[in-house]
């Protein structure tokens, strides 16, 4: 069976009037169904560009990106994308925000409404469906944004540092929430982050990128003796520090 | 009483002081207006200023009463109001339409930008006589005169506001597989409602100015005509 996602020698450069910036060179890796992959790298190395390429918002200049073995040229239906901030619209209620994607894709029907209601109930937001985003805490807003993405039933979730905007305490809680939700909904996820401890605590495998123009430096598998730990529990597991130091060394070592 | 049951004494005092402050402000606002009218009336009665030139509250009231009786005040106010509302609605409709068009087509907006800036800085009220010459002395040209004062500023303001929308909110629509039309309908238009309202507040006044100037030159009815008719006495 094909891997869910396969990147094969992907390169990308930004073109502006003042010149050309090589963001990514020769990136290759695969993501298996059900995996949680974290991509780490120095800031500005092109991590977000990678997600834009996978989602189809940008097209690679060289190489190919295959989803379930197929190449597509427009935004891929089976991909959900979570941005750094929740970007809930203040002029819509929480309910209006979480059904935004369904509305755009004309998929708002009884079935999808039932799915949204169920998720709102499961994740403690049903009571707030008529509220404005400003009335919710940062963690609740992030959960609402996740439901907005999950409402479209994506196979693969792209997470672009979705926890960076939160304060540390909220961030730890939301990481646990998101990991639990993804595990429960059996989703494959690709998380981009510059926070190594976040990567170690959440991922099955971590892809380490070099600084710009980025290429894959190493892929490290996170093996914890005890399976199915929550991200928070992983942080106090014996293997945690070892993996953290390994990634730290990889990221800071010169070529 | 039951509503305030849980409110502490300090909170109740604070709320009372807020209320007192608000009442004081309203009272002084009214007082200033009354004092101004009194001073004006007194100044005329005492002969400090010439009532023929500066008029007086009692004269204004008397004329207003007379015009009320012969219904002419309703005719003139009604005409000006209708013309102002017509040009205002057209400015909003054409302004939003043009701004959307420019937002859709960035190349077009780059081409037209210098023209818009020049048109916006033209002294439109000074060009009202030309409009009357071109379009004739009728309601149509007065409405166009009203529009001409507000339209270019509206287009520029709205277009700039559209461009200042958070780029990530737009990206969000694309990540949900939306089109440029979705960006317009789901983000740009609802997100710029506050801007639209503030632009409209400015426009209603500008349209009135344009309409009155149009009426100065090309009308037999309306407040602008009334002003000119009144000032004929002095020529």
Image: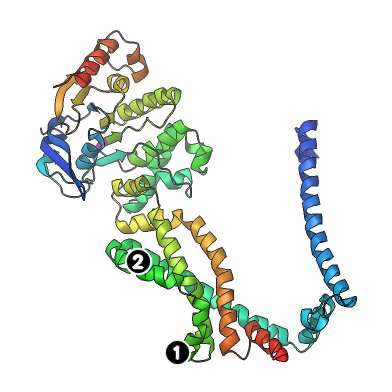
Asked whether A247 or B180 is in front, the reply is A247
Asked whether B41 or B165 is in front, the reply is B41
Whole-percent x, y for residue B49 in the image: 83, 77
Whole-percent x, y for residue A95 in the image: 45, 45
The numbered mark at residue B134 is 1
Q: Is residue A159 a member of the stretch shown in magenta?
A: no
Which of the image's four quarters has the N terminus of chain B? top right
Q: Left or right: A145 with respect to A213?
A: right
Mark 2 packing: few (<14 Cα in 10 Å), some, or many (20+)? some
| Residue name at image x 41 percent, y 58 percent | B160
Q: Which secondary structure dominates the residues rendered in magenta?
A: loop
Whole-percent x, y for residue A35 in the image: 22, 27
Which of the image's four quarters has the C terminus of chain B? bottom right
User: In which image quadrant can residue A191 be found?
Assistant: top left
| Residue name at image x 55 percent, y 65 percent | B202
User: Numbered disc 2: what chain?
Assistant: B
Helix, strand or loop under label 1: helix
Q: Which residue is mark 2?
A: B113
Q: Is residue A151 a member of the stretch shown in magenta?
A: yes
Asked whether B6 or A122 is in front, the reply is B6
For marks 1 and 2, the one nearer the N-term is: 2
Q: Which residues are magenta?
A: A150-157
**In the orientation shown, which residue stands out farthest toward the top?**
A238
Q: How many marks?
A: 2
């Amino acid at each position: 069976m094909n891997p869910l996602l396969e990147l094969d020698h992907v390169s990308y450069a930004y073109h502006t009037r003042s010149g050309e910036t090589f963001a990514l060179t020769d990136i290759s890796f695969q993501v298996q169904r059900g995996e949680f992959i974290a991509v780490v790298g120095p800031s500005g190395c092109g991590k977000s560009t990678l997600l834009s390429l996978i989602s189809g918002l940008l097209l690679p200049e060289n190489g190919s990106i295959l989803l379930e073995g197929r190449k597509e040229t427009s935004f891929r239906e089976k991909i959900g994308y979570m941005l750094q901030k929740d970007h809930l619209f203040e002029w819509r209620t929480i309910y209006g925000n979480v059904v935004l994607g369904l509305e755009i894709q004309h998929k708002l029907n009884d079935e999808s409404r039932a799915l949204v209601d169920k998720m709102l109930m499961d994740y403690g937001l049903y009571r707030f469906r008529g509220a404005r985003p400003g009335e919710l805490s940062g963690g609740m807003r992030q959960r609402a944004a996740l439901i907005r993405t999950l409402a479209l039933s994506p196979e693969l979730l792209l997470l672009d540092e979705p926890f960076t905007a939160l304060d540390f305490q909220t961030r730890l809680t939301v990481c646990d929430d998101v990991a639990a939700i993804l595990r429960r909904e059996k989703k494959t996820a690709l998380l981009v982050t510059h926070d190594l401890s976040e990567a170690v605590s959440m991922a099955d495998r971590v892809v380490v990128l070099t600084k710009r123009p980025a290429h894959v430096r190493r892929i490290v598998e996170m093996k914890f003796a005890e399976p199915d730990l929550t991200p928070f529990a992983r942080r106090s597991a014996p293997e945690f520090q070892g993996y953290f130091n390994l990634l730290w060394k990889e990221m800071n070592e010169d070529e | 009483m039951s509503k305030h049951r849980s409110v502490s004494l300090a909170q109740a005092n604070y709320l009372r002081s807020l209320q007192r402050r608000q009442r004081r402000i309203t009272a002084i606002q009214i007082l200033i207006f009354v004092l101004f009218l009194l001073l004006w009336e007194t100044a005329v009665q005492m002969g400090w200023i010439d009532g023929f030139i500066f008029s007086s509250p009692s004269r204004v009231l008397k004329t207003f009463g007379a015009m009320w009786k012969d219904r002419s005040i309703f005719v003139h106010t009604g005409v000006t109001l209708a013309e102002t509302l017509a040009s205002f609605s057209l400015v909003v409709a054409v302004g939003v339409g043009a701004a959307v068009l420019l937002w859709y087509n960035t190349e077009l907006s780059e081409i037209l930008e210098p023209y818009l800036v020049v048109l916006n800085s033209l002294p439109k009220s000074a060009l009202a006589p030309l409009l009357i010459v071109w379009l004739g002395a009728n309601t149509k040209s007065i409405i166009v005169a009203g529009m001409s004062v507000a339209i270019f500023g509206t287009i520029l303001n709205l277009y700039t506001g559209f461009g200042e929308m958070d780029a990530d909110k737009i990206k969000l629509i694309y990540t949900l597989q939306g089109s440029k039309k979705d960006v317009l309908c789901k983000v740009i238009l609802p997100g710029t409602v506050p801007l639209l309202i503030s632009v409209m507040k400015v426009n209603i006044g500008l349209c009135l100015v344009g309409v009155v100037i149009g009426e100065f030159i090309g009308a037999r009815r309306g407040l602008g005509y009334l002003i000119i008719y009144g000032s004929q006495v002095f020529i």
